[in-house]
Image: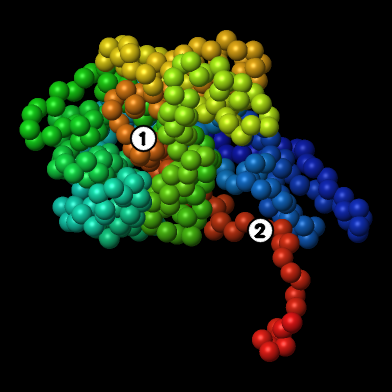
Amino acid sequence: MSQKNSAAAKESNKNVKVIDNVSGKESNFPILTGTEGAPVIDIRKLYAETGYFTYDPGFIATGSCESKITYIDGDKGILLHRGYPIEQLAENSDFLEVCYLLLYGELPKQNQKTEFDRAITLHTMLHEQITNFYRGFRRDAHPMAIMCGVVGALSAFYHDSTDIADPHQRMVASYRMVAKMPTIAGWAYKYSLGQPFVYPRNDLEFSENFLHMMFATPCEEYKINPVIAKAMDRILILHADHEQNASTSTVRLAGSSGANPFACISAGIASLWGPAHGGANEAVLNMLNEIGNKDNIADFIKKAKDPNDPFRIMGFGHRVYKNFDPRAKIMRETCHSVLDELDIREEPLLDLAMELERIALEDEYFVSRKLYPNVDFYSGIIFQALGIPTTMFTVLFAVARTVGWIAQWNEMIEDPNQKIGRPRQLYTGSAQRDHVPISERG
């Protein structure tokens, strides 16, 4: 499951010279170049050469791996999957085609696409005993808590795909994770409602199947709306992978120890759950509820501009994209198509969101700082329009991101340079001291 005909990072004829001002020792470190992005300084021998290591909280300036999967240029607003712009993939591909691309490195031919789609479809069911896991949770348990537990438990049911040294088992595990995640998510939602589980259907496309498991009941036939199904497919594409973010790095770090793939993906889900990561679209809805109605927007815009006020307009700007989020334009179009299809004109919260979008796009404060609506702003509105509760927002994110996690995990396993993750630290605690008997402590 790796990309063909792709060059590895190359050592340039340049290097960085480091001179220790204390000892006077001089060390040289090579500069590596990739196919895109800034060159990097290879500091793997820094500690051995100098006795120093780097201090980089959050790994903001540290490349932890070499990857051929996803490239982001935050300044230019570029997102590429295996070299293909996200805009082209969202417009011309379906989600499973993007899954194939991320896993194998190339867009599939027709026979490969047919075979891959069928293979994923045949893995969508869950072992029947897994239903007992759901019944062990409280009905009001957060769906992400359920997903963490159920996904981690999959290794207890699928022993034939946990040997990470076997390429075939890695492939089977990869297919299973992509296929079963919508079922796990749909069942988590149904369990929270007290409704019966809806089993996957082999006659439905991936996104159609997901919607069916979320919203169908035994009482009547659930009719798939093609506009909604297309919107869900685009949402999944736009969230499929995003380079070395917190959850992806978590999956890689867990996998570096040799942990089975189900445990690694469960770790990724736990990381995604955080409000600073996957919970951003839920935070958008919470903010809109706080604003209340359109008459209050001006006051909250003023609060957002006040550097002494902790209030922030959620869903605008992005930590990586300093210009614009390339996914946002596609998500905006998708959002408006959903609202038009559902004929939503007077829903207060959605009306409020659209007015906030209009004002922010015209306000000099936001425009000059390039604080444009991002993908989380629009995805939250779409989910709200579909009647999906905020507790499920991050769950849908996890369904989409699973293929990215799996692709990154596979790449890490196959990388001969990969080592077990072991970050260093800048220790600022007490220096070594001797133990004092409790009777002598002052």
Q: In the picture shown, does residue 406 fall above or below 97? A: below
Q: Is residue 276 visible in this depiction of the protein?
A: yes
Residue 61: quadrant of the picture: top right
Percent coordinates x, y for residue 400 in the rendering: 37, 35
Q: How is the image coloured?
A: rainbow
Residue 47 is left or right of residue 195, and the answer is right
Residue under label 1: 390
What's the residue at 32%, 34% (across, down)?
Answer: 389
Q: Is residue 83 among the parts visible in the rendering?
A: no
Quarter of the image for the C terminus: give it. bottom right
Along the horizontal axis of the image, is 104 left or right of 183? right
Q: Residue at x 57, y 52 (%)?
A: 417
Residue type at numbered disc 2:
Arg
According to the picture, the residue beneath numbered tag 2 turns out to be 424
Given contact means CB atoms under 8 Å apart, are the residues at marks 1 and 2 in contact?
no
Q: Is residue 336 above or below residue 310?
A: above
